[in-house]
Amino acid sequence: MSLTLTNTEIETVTGRKKFSAQVRQLQRMGIECKRAADGSPVVSRLAFEQAMGVRRDAANDVKLHLDFLNAS
Protein backbone atom coordinates (compact mmCIF):
# COMPACT_ATOMS: atom_id res chain seq x y z
CA MET A 1 0.00 0.00 0.00
CA SER A 2 1.42 3.40 -0.95
CA LEU A 3 2.02 6.23 1.50
CA THR A 4 -0.27 8.56 -0.45
CA LEU A 5 -3.72 8.24 -1.99
CA THR A 6 -3.78 7.65 -5.73
CA ASN A 7 -5.33 10.20 -8.08
CA THR A 8 -8.25 7.81 -8.58
CA GLU A 9 -8.78 7.50 -4.82
CA ILE A 10 -8.75 11.29 -4.45
CA GLU A 11 -11.32 11.62 -7.26
CA THR A 12 -13.50 8.99 -5.57
CA VAL A 13 -13.26 10.58 -2.13
CA THR A 14 -13.92 14.13 -3.33
CA GLY A 15 -16.27 13.44 -6.22
CA ARG A 16 -14.30 16.06 -8.16
CA LYS A 17 -11.99 15.91 -11.21
CA LYS A 18 -10.41 19.38 -11.19
CA PHE A 19 -7.43 19.68 -8.87
CA SER A 20 -8.58 22.97 -7.33
CA ALA A 21 -12.03 21.54 -6.61
CA GLN A 22 -10.44 18.42 -5.08
CA VAL A 23 -8.32 20.56 -2.74
CA ARG A 24 -11.35 22.61 -1.64
CA GLN A 25 -13.36 19.45 -0.97
CA LEU A 26 -10.51 17.83 0.96
CA GLN A 27 -10.21 20.96 3.11
CA ARG A 28 -13.98 20.92 3.78
CA MET A 29 -13.63 17.29 4.87
CA GLY A 30 -10.79 18.17 7.24
CA ILE A 31 -8.23 16.20 5.26
CA GLU A 32 -4.84 17.86 5.07
CA CYS A 33 -3.18 17.89 1.67
CA LYS A 34 -0.19 19.36 -0.12
CA ARG A 35 0.10 20.29 -3.80
CA ALA A 36 2.35 18.52 -6.31
CA ALA A 37 4.25 20.50 -8.95
CA ASP A 38 1.38 19.96 -11.42
CA GLY A 39 -1.17 21.31 -8.91
CA SER A 40 -2.66 17.95 -8.01
CA PRO A 41 -3.41 17.30 -4.35
CA VAL A 42 -1.12 14.96 -2.44
CA VAL A 43 -2.81 13.27 0.51
CA SER A 44 -1.00 10.99 2.91
CA ARG A 45 -2.86 7.77 3.55
CA LEU A 46 -2.31 8.27 7.29
CA ALA A 47 -3.89 11.77 7.23
CA PHE A 48 -6.84 10.39 5.28
CA GLU A 49 -7.32 7.46 7.65
CA GLN A 50 -7.12 9.70 10.71
CA ALA A 51 -9.69 12.12 9.27
CA MET A 52 -11.99 9.16 8.54
CA GLY A 53 -11.68 7.84 12.10
CA VAL A 54 -9.49 4.83 11.37
CA ARG A 55 -7.19 3.86 14.22
CA ARG A 56 -4.39 1.33 14.17
CA ASP A 57 -3.58 -0.88 17.13
CA ALA A 58 -0.08 -1.95 18.17
CA ALA A 59 -0.08 -4.83 15.69
CA ASN A 60 -0.73 -2.38 12.80
CA ASP A 61 -4.13 -3.90 12.15
CA VAL A 62 -6.67 -1.39 10.90
CA LYS A 63 -9.69 -1.05 13.15
CA LEU A 64 -12.56 1.34 12.64
CA HIS A 65 -14.01 2.56 15.93
CA LEU A 66 -17.70 3.31 15.60
CA ASP A 67 -18.54 3.36 19.32
CA PHE A 68 -20.05 6.82 18.90
CA LEU A 69 -22.90 5.24 16.91
CA ASN A 70 -24.07 3.41 20.04
CA ALA A 71 -24.01 6.51 22.24
CA SER A 72 -27.42 7.81 23.16
Image (cartoon, grey):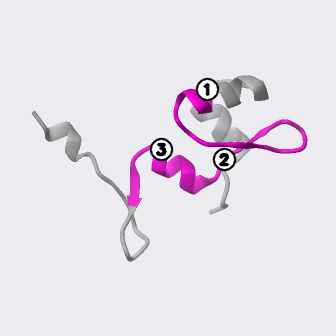
**The image quarter in which residue 15 lies:** top right
Q: Which residue ends up furthest to the left in the rendered image?
A: 72
Residue 28 covered by magenta stretch: yes
The amino acid sitting under disc 1 is Gln
Q: CA distance from mark 3 to mark 2?
A: 11 Å
Q: Is residue 64 above or below residue 71?
A: below
Q: Earlier in the sequence, mark 3 or mark 2?
A: 2
Quarter containing the C terminus: top left
Q: From which residue to which does the magenta span run?
A: 26-55
**The image quarter in which residue 69 lies:** top left
Q: Earlier in the sequence, mark 2 or mark 1?
A: 1
In depth, the one of 11 and 22 nearer the eye is: 22
Q: Secondary structure at mark 1?
A: helix
Residue at 55% in and 56% down: 46
Residue at 14% in and 40% down: 70
**The image quarter in which residue 17 lies:** top right
Q: Secondary structure at mark 3?
A: helix
Residue 25: which numbered mark, if any? 1
Q: Is residue 52 left or right of residue 31?
A: left
Residue at 52% in and 36% down: 30
Q: Residues within 10 Å of mark 3 (few under 14, many from 20)?
A: some
Q: Which residue ends up furthest to the bottom in the rendered image?
A: 59
**Residue 43 coordinates in the image, percent (x, y):** 66, 47
Q: CA distance from mark 1 to mark 3?
A: 13 Å
**Residue for badge 3:** 51
**Residue for badge 2:** 43
**Residue 22 coordinates in the image, percent (x, y):** 69, 28
Q: Residues within 10 Å of mark 2 (few under 14, many from 20)?
A: many
Q: Earlier in the sequence, mark 1 or mark 3?
A: 1
Q: Secondary structure at mark 2?
A: loop
